[in-house]
Amino acid sequence: MNVTISGPDGKPRCRWCSAAPEFLDYHDSEWGFPVSDDHRLFEKLSLESFQSGLSWRTILVKRENFRAAFHDFDFDRIARFTQRDVDRLLKDEGIVRHRGKIEAVINNARQAQELVKREGSLAAFIWRYEPGIENASEPQTVSTSPESLALSKDLKEMGWKFVGPTTVYAFMQAMGLVNDHVADCVIRASVERARKSFRRPGSSEIPKT
């Protein structure tokens, strides 16, 4: 099966971005580009956990509602949520009203605070799990990796919830820890350039050229 589709400009893109109208812009401007902002990283981990058992489109179309409900995923604010906030969120029709996932985000916000105290930032910790070139797999052929298994395991040991290895791998794809755009996708080269110029959090190394 062809792994690409022709985009509006006639250039090839990953086939999955044709599955819903919301996917094209997300694919072209976000998916795979490296991220070091702690709130964005926490947001994506949280949204991936909400996606469990659902489609990404369901979450993507509700993303702005999630951001409003969870204060732009500022984990310091979320960590102070109480039962009243849980009750409020369970009544919010703009998000996925799943008690376990809502409570997991609040729990994970508290764990994120502790991690930042130890590591300096969430990003510095997360980017340690970036795969080396020698461990790269063919794009979009796996749903987990040794690195996602390791990150999932370590997060769970710290008390994080809803962070299984498949969830974590999807997070790593989206946040640029791997470039999983297929070889012929027009966006792959843009992502690779962004990754080469990206300064890894917690690293004093000069960006790759």
Image (cartoon, rainbow, N blue to C red):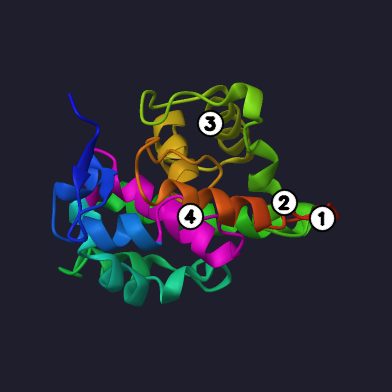
Q: Which residues are magenta?
A: 30-56
- Residue at numbered disc 3: 148
* Position of residue 36 in the picture relative to residue 70 (left or right): right
Asked where in the image residue 27 lies, by quadrant, the reply is bottom left
| Image spot of residue 133 (x, y percent) | 64, 29
Can you tell which of label 4 and label 1 is closer to the viewer? 4
Q: Is residue 97 visible?
A: no
| Image spot of residue 80 (x, y percent) | 53, 70
- Residue at numbered disc 4: 190
Can you tell which of label 3 and label 4 is closer to the viewer? 4
Q: Say above or below: 36 vs 155.
A: below
Q: CA distance from mark 4 to mark 1?
A: 19 Å
Q: Say above or below: 138 vs 66.
A: above
Q: CA distance from mark 3 to mark 1?
A: 25 Å
Q: CA distance from mark 4 to mark 2?
A: 14 Å
- Residue at numbered disc 2: 209
Earlier in the chain: of badge 2 and badge 3, it is 3
| Image spot of residue 156 (x, y percent) | 56, 35
Asked where in the image residue 10 lies, by quadrant, the reply is bottom left
Mark 2: secondary structure: loop
* Position of residue 106 in the picture relative to residue 158 (left or right): left
- Residue at numbered disc 1: 206
Q: Quadrant of the N terminus?
A: top left
Earlier in the chain: of badge 4 and badge 1, it is 4
Tag 1 near tag 2, CB within 8 Å: yes
Mark 4: secondary structure: helix
> Which residue is found at the position 26% from the left and 52% from the top?
11
